[in-house]
């Protein structure tokens, strides 16, 4: 469980478009407050999904060779297929000019509530669903198991926390770094999405299929 959550958490927090968007948010007028609101909206959604799954399962994973266990694995496999398809689609679009999302042009006028809503909206829900399917299979019997869930939620928000702290401590340097990050993403966003989607999707699909076959045997 832990390795899956680490991989998924890293994929969530390093999503390219969201990283650039958050950098622009904290660089905008009253950016620190907007950044906190964005992180709150993002983190609340991740925690809520994990909490709902834990409430449903009671911290007890479905037994192997049962329908619920197989369904959880099938869901993770399908998410893996979806990510691979998204990576393939992005690969086909490589080289095309990127159109800036409309919300990026309105960041100076963004309210904290809108920033929180944006955090929830930009959350890569397919990856969150993969995390939820992993939590379904988690046996929460020790403190370490619960700490793994806390770590997942924090890891999924970690890049924003680092950028928020960096902006608070060194606003001018952070603004320059954000512009550099945006320039790098403009040049390499497609490659980052393709590689990330294929790696995470391949991991989810391969491991889920292996476990499905093992259970069937």
Image (cartoon, rainbow, N blue to C red):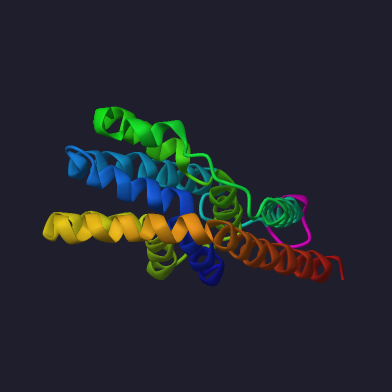
Q: Residue at x 38, y 46 (%)?
A: 21
In the image, is 132 to the left or to the right of 32?
right
- For the question of whether residue 196 can be seen, the reply is yes
Find residue 134 and report its image quarter: bottom right
Which x, y percent locates residue 120?
Answer: 42, 37
Q: Judge whether 48 appears above or below 149 on screen.
A: above
Q: Nearer the viewer, residue 72 or 196?
A: 196
How many labels sit on residues? 0
Residue 67: say if magenta: yes
Q: Is residue 98 magenta?
A: no
Q: Residue furthest right?
A: 217
Residue 83 horizontal side relative to residue 187, left or right: right
Magenta segment main secondary structure: loop
The front one of 181 and 153 is: 181
Quick one: which residue is furthest to the left in this view? 169
Horizontally, is 203 left or right of 54 in the view?
A: right
Residue at screen point 50% across, 59% down: 187
Q: Position of residue 208 (x, y in %)?
A: 73, 64
Which range of residues does the magenta coloring cover?
63-68
Residue depicted at 55% across the width and 55% down the height? 131
Q: Closest to the observer: 192 or 64? A: 192
Residue 76 in the image, given as x and y percentages of width and height = 68, 55
When asked about the image quadrant of residue 38, the answer is top left
Q: Quadrant of the N terminus?
A: bottom right
Q: Answer whether residue 158 is visible to the viewer in this image.
A: no
Q: Point out residue 168 in the picture as x, y percentages from the top left corner.
A: 14, 54
Residue at x-position 24% and y-position 58%: 176
* The C terminus, quarter of image: bottom right
């Amino acid at each position: 469980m832990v390795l899956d959550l680490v991989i998924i958490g890293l994929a969530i927090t390093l999503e390219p478009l969201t990283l650039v968007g958050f950098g622009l948010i904290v660089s905008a007028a009253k950016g620190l407050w907007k950044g906190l609101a964005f992180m709150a909206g993002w983190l609340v959604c991740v925690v809520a999904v994990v909490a709902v799954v834990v409430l449903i399962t009671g911290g007890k994973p479905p037994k192997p060779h049962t329908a619920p266990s197989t369904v959880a694995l099938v869901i993770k496999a399908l998410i893996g297929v979806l990510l691979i398809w998204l990576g393939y689609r992005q690969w086909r679009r490589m080289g095309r000019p990127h159109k800036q999302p409309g919300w990026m042009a309105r960041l100076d006028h963004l309210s904290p509530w809108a920033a929180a809503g944006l955090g929830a909206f930009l959350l890569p829900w397919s990856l969150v669903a993969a995390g939820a399917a992993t939590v379904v299979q988690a046996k929460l019997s020790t403190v370490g198991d619960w700490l793994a869930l806390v770590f997942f939620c924090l890891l999924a928000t970690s890049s924003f926390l680092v950028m928020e702290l960096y902006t608070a401590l060194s606003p001018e340097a952070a603004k320059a770094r954000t512009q550099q990050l945006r320039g790098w993403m403009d040049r390499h966003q497609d490659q980052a999405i393709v590689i990330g989607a294929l790696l995470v999707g391949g991991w989810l699909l391969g491991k889920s299929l292996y476990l499905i076959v093992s259970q069937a045997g």
